[in-house]
Image (cartoon, grey):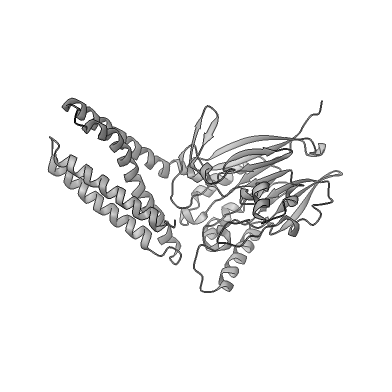
Amino acid sequence: MTLQWIPLISLLVVNFFLDIWLYRKFRRSEHWPRLKSGVHAVLSLVLLAVIMVAVFTPHRQCDNHTFVGLMWMLYIYYAFYVPRYLAALVWMPTHLKWSGRRTRKVGGTVATLLGILVFVYMLFGSLQATYHINVEHVDMEFENLPDEFDGYRIAQFSDTHLGTYDGNPRFMTFCVDSIMAQKPDLICFTGDLVSRFSSEALPHKKELSRLHAPDGVLSVLGNHDDGHYFQWPSEEQRQADQQALIDLEREMGWKVLVNDHIILRRDSSEIAVIGTECFDSWPFPKKGFLDSAYVDYETSKRFTILLQHNPTQWDLDNIYKLKLIDFRLCDKVDLMLSGHTHAMQCMITLFGHKFSPASLNCEFWGGQYSKGNHKLYVNIGLGMVGMPVRLGSAYPEVTLITLKKKKTK
């Protein structure tokens, strides 16, 4: 939720001139000019107060109730201004010198209707879309998959950010029901159970404890699970809260892989599932290296699945160039499961192709990717961070991945 000062000031300046322009047009309107301009002025001042409170409240020091309130305040600000921008883009051209009275009237009507529709849609994105769970069914073929694991089903979920729901377990009930309905062989959670505190998970412990599968429930830690998004009095307290979260997950019956791995067996065949700490970005320290979790990575011929919250680690070339990790560590990873991006909680799907502003920041932001014999799947998450909304087709996601043995000719 952190806003840099230059973008913030730029945004406020643009919004100020937009509000002045709209105010002047309302003052010159034929019908109820004082009412329109007065309501507009009051609303603009209220929204200015809202964004000031949302920005200047020290969110790294506040409790979860306040934090969720700040998320909503930030979203309310955008929910009113995005329709204004779009309406202004339609209305402004009709006020050029050569535009007639009828053109201006039609333009004003169209702009008003567009603004209302966009505002209603943004309300839908926060009040309804955030509870609409999408189950993605994905088949993945591998030549080196053991025959005994042909048809193996993995349910993946990620980024619950439980603090967003402020203690209400209703949504997690839907999520658990959706996961269990897939009848998976293995359930994998790829990080960010909470946003800041381990206590966010307590109201949801009972529901999440219902998750079970023949090969268990595996989880890894995300960047928010580290507790870096709250200003703790000491590093010892941050570490203690992180450990409390790990203990809570274990009490729910989950196997937490903190730079660790397990071996899945079917008759004489084996699969290694590795879990590493979040390979985070600046300003947090780099960690989650494969060699600390799976010492046999160089010699083992097992089919290997890596659970890693941040999909950046799969971009072997960039990581090698930055000298953050030896790219050979990922040579043995056949499948990597990640989350982290949320698709920026905004995605459009057209003719089977998906588009998201997240692609401007991350090459691997959602769905399936392949490089040679290696595959990556990025789950766009269940919860929210920053603002409590999911727009377009960026619905909360549960993924059912079915491993298939690739038939050789």
The image quadrant where one finds the C terminus is top right
Q: Is residue 300 left or right of residue 36?
A: right
Q: Residue at x 81, y 52 (%)?
A: 298
In the rendered image of this protein, does residue 382 appear above or below residue 49?
above
Nearest to the observer: residue 145 or residue 86: 86
Q: For the view shown, which residue lies furthest in the right direction? A: 268
In the rendered image of this protein, does residue 72 appear above or below residue 242?
above
The image quadrant where one finds the N terminus is bottom left
Q: Is residue 128 left or right of residue 214?
A: left
Give x and y (percent) for residue 67: 43, 60
From where the camera sits, is residue 182 visible?
no
In the rendered image of this protein, does residue 28 appear above or below residue 251?
above
Q: Residue at x 65, y 43 (%)?
A: 155
Picture quadrant of residue 289: bottom right
Q: Residue at x 67, y 58 (%)?
A: 288
From where the camera sits, is residue 169 visible?
yes
Give x and y (percent) for residue 227: 55, 63
Nearest to the observer: residue 398 or residue 409: 409
> In the rendered picture of this protein, how many numbered marks are placed on residues?
0
Q: Is residue 124 left or right of residue 284?
A: left
Nearest to the observer: residue 41 or residue 361: 361
Picture quadrant of residue 137: top right
In the rendered image of this protein, does residue 203 appear above or below residue 145?
below
Give x and y (percent) for residue 193: 57, 55
Picture quadrant of residue 4: bottom left
Q: Residue at x 70, y 45 (%)?
A: 186
Q: Is residue 237 left or right of residue 82?
A: right
Give x and y (percent) for residue 197: 52, 63
